[in-house]
Amino acid sequence: MEQVLGGKLTIRQAAELLDLSKRQVKRLFLTPPSAAILNRILCLKYERKATQGSTVSFLGSTYQLIDLKGNVMPLRSRSKVVILKYLDGAFSALYKDKPFALQVFYPPPKTKKNCIKLRKRRYTE
């Protein structure tokens, strides 16, 4: 491949070497990748497991996956999610090889109904 990029091989020789058609070789080597593809290649990837509440923990925060329509993606417990951290500091996620946005998850505030009060017991000897 380095020979093709360096101009030492013709497209025909590269096609024979890689067992590809001329059209496929041109598409591989002569067209630059799009910005979205480059952004996905040049990022840090972190693998995480989903919790029971369809959330993922990353860098001390809890996130939900949001699809293109703005809906929260339900996740199976312990399913694999890949967090992508881009060079500009932005985050996104891949679940089943599909891209998702991340939204910080804030648990609902505890109310008196949700809390279980434990009575303090005093033991006497």
Image (cartoon, grey):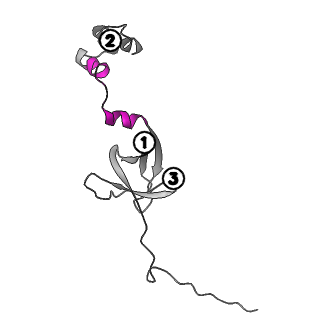
Q: Is residue 50 above or below residue 22?
A: below
- Name which residue lies at 44% across and 39% down: 87
Q: Nearer the viewer, mark 1 or mark 3?
A: 1
Q: Is residue 100 above or below residue 121?
A: above
Element under label 3?
Answer: loop
Q: Which mark is residue 59?
A: 3
Q: Which residues are magenta?
A: 24-42
Q: Amino acid at mark 3?
A: Leu
Q: Which mark is residue 88?
A: 1
| 10 or 120: nearer the viewer | 10
Circle 2 residues within 10 Å: few <14, some 14–19, many ≥20: some
Number of numbered discs overlaid on the protein picture: 3
Q: Amino acid at mark 1?
A: Asp
**Is 35 part of what is drawn in magenta?**
yes
| 11 or 78: nearer the viewer | 11
Query: Which is more N-terminal, label 3 or label 2?
Result: 2
- Name which residue lies at 41% across and 15% down: 2
Residue bearing the label numbered 2: 14
Q: Is residue 39 above or below residue 8?
A: below
Query: Which is more N-terminal, label 3 or label 1?
Result: 3
Query: Which is more N-terminal, label 2 or label 1?
Result: 2
Element under label 2?
Answer: helix
Residue 21 image point, x, y percent: 25, 16
Alpha carbon separation for disc pair 1 and 2:
36 Å
Q: Nearer the viewer, mark 1 or mark 2?
A: 1
Alpha carbon separation for disc pair 2 and 3:
45 Å
Element under label 1?
Answer: loop
Magenta stretch, main secondary structure, is: helix
| 88 or 27: nearer the viewer | 88
Residue 37 image point, x, y percent: 33, 34
